[in-house]
Structures are given as structure tokens and as C-alpha cells.
Amino acid sequence: MDINYLLNRIRENITILRETGWIVSEPRSPEWWGGLKTPGEIAISAFLVQMTRWETVVKVIEKLRSEGLNSPESISSLKTEEIEKLIRPVNFYKTKARRIKSFSEEVLSHGGLENFLVVENRNILLSLEGIGEETADSLLLYAGNQLFFPPSEYLRRVLSRVEGRGLSKLQAKNEVILTLPRNLFTYKLFHAGIVAVGKRFCLLKCPKCETCFLNSICKFKV
Ligand code: SF4
């Protein structure tokens, strides 16, 4: 599969991307991530969003913002129980409060988020509770502006179906990073585009191939 052809189809259908909440802007802007305003908000939301609707996450982030607690640095001074109260609307808020607290303390010990979210600290990120490869690489790409492409179930499913062969998450990611032009804007655009296809069209059951903008090249289309 020509990954760059997929990239072009995503570029041509950028409106759909915007409708799913990805705001395409200049490469280093945090707005890509659902319209959030700072890298700190992206980092906190990466924990909140697990098993939770994005709309709920945004409400919690807005509350944190209004109280000046929308960064790992500021939230690290709170006790875990205080974080629990602030994020209570999200699912599994107790577990997430504990994870946010430990992530925030790690950020603080590295002198802030900008210093922490760099390539050299990827293994430290992966050692923290609640951070797998997808979250680590999403944080590095969208909050740290580092050139990492996050593996995801959406990417695995869409590429597997388009190519008509079963791929693992790692195989799908490797295929992308071997061929995609290495720059921040392209990495963010391609990742966001595949998420949009996965959410809007390429559903696990009953994919909406009739309206999917990849249907002319997809081997799976129904
Ligand atoms: S055409 Fe269907 S199977 Fe192929 S990517 Fe689109 S929704 Fe998924």
C-alpha cells in the first residue's frame, strides 16, 4: 500500500478530520488534540480519556483550567484525593487520579513538561502506570512535538482492511514510519486522519464503506 496515497486522500478530506475534533493548525499547536490550549492539557487529557467520552474529558479540562490546575506542574502539588474530586466525572477517576499524580511528580522532577517529553525519556514514560506505547508516543508527538508516530488500534484496523491482510499494531506502525515523510505536520495529519476514518467509517462491526473516502482503494470494502 502506498502510504503517501492514503496521506493525499486524508489531505483531500480534511473537513471530515475537523468534524471529528482534530483541529489542523500549525505543526506545534496543541489545538490538534480536540482543541485543547496547552501541552499540559494534552498530557492530563491523555489519562482522562481512557474509557471515557471526549466531551466529558473536555468539561473536566475546562474546570481544571478555570482553577489554574491545567498542567502537570500545577496539579502535582495536590493530594491524590483532591485530584479525585476534580476529575470525578470521568470513568475510573480514582485510578486516573493516582496515575496523573505520579506522572505530574515525574514531570516536576525533570524540570517541567517541556524537558520531560523528549525522545530520551520515552522509556521513563513507558515505565509509568497507565502509559503504554500508544499513550507515550501520542504524548511525545502532540504535547512534546517530537517525531514519534503512535501505534493505534485504528491504524491497525484501517491498514489491515485497506491492504486486505492482517497486520499487528507494530507492523502497521512500521509500515507508516518507513514511508511517511518525516515531519511533524505530516505525522500529526496522518495519525489524526486515520483516527477520523476509524471513528467515522471503519467501525469494528458494520463499517460504513459506502461513504468512506478510502473505498476506492480498500480491499475489504463491503
Ligand atoms: S472502505 Fe470500509 S473497510 Fe475500507 S477503510 Fe473504509 S470503512 Fe474501512
Image: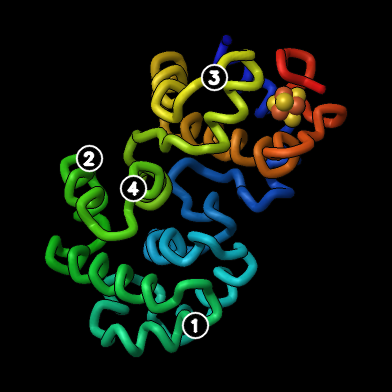
Q: Earlier in the sequence, mark 1 or mark 4?
A: 1
Q: What residue lies at 65% left-to-right and 18% top-to-bottom?
A: 162
Image quadrant containing the C terminus = top right
Label 1 vs label 4: CA separation? Answer: 23 Å
- Residue under circle 2? 119
Ligand 1: which quarter?
top right
Q: What residue lies at 40% left-to-right and 66% top-to-bottom?
A: 44
Residue 173 in picture, x, y percent from top left: 43, 26
Determine contact: label 1, label 4, CB under 8 Å. no
Label 4's element? loop
- Residue under circle 3? 166
Label 2 vs label 1: CA separation? Answer: 32 Å
- Residue under circle 4? 132
Residue 189 in picture, x, y percent from top left: 55, 35
Amino acid tagged 4:
Gly
Label 1 vs label 3: CA separation? Answer: 39 Å
In the displayed structure image, the side of residue 112 where residue 37 appears, left or right: right
Can see residue 212?
yes
Q: Classify mark 2: residues with Cα within 10 Å, few (<14), some (14-19) or many (20+).
A: some
Q: Give the number of the disc on residue 88.
A: 1
Label 2's element? helix
Front position among marks 1 and 3? 3
Residue 139 in picture, x, y percent from top left: 37, 50
Determine the image quadrant of residue 179: top left
Above or below 6: residue 185: below
Label 1's element? loop
User: Mark 4: is the Cβ under 8 angstroms from ligand 1?
Assistant: no
Label 4 vs label 2: CA separation? Answer: 15 Å
Q: Earlier in the sequence, mark 4 or mark 3?
A: 4
Q: Earlier in the sequence, mark 4 or mark 2?
A: 2
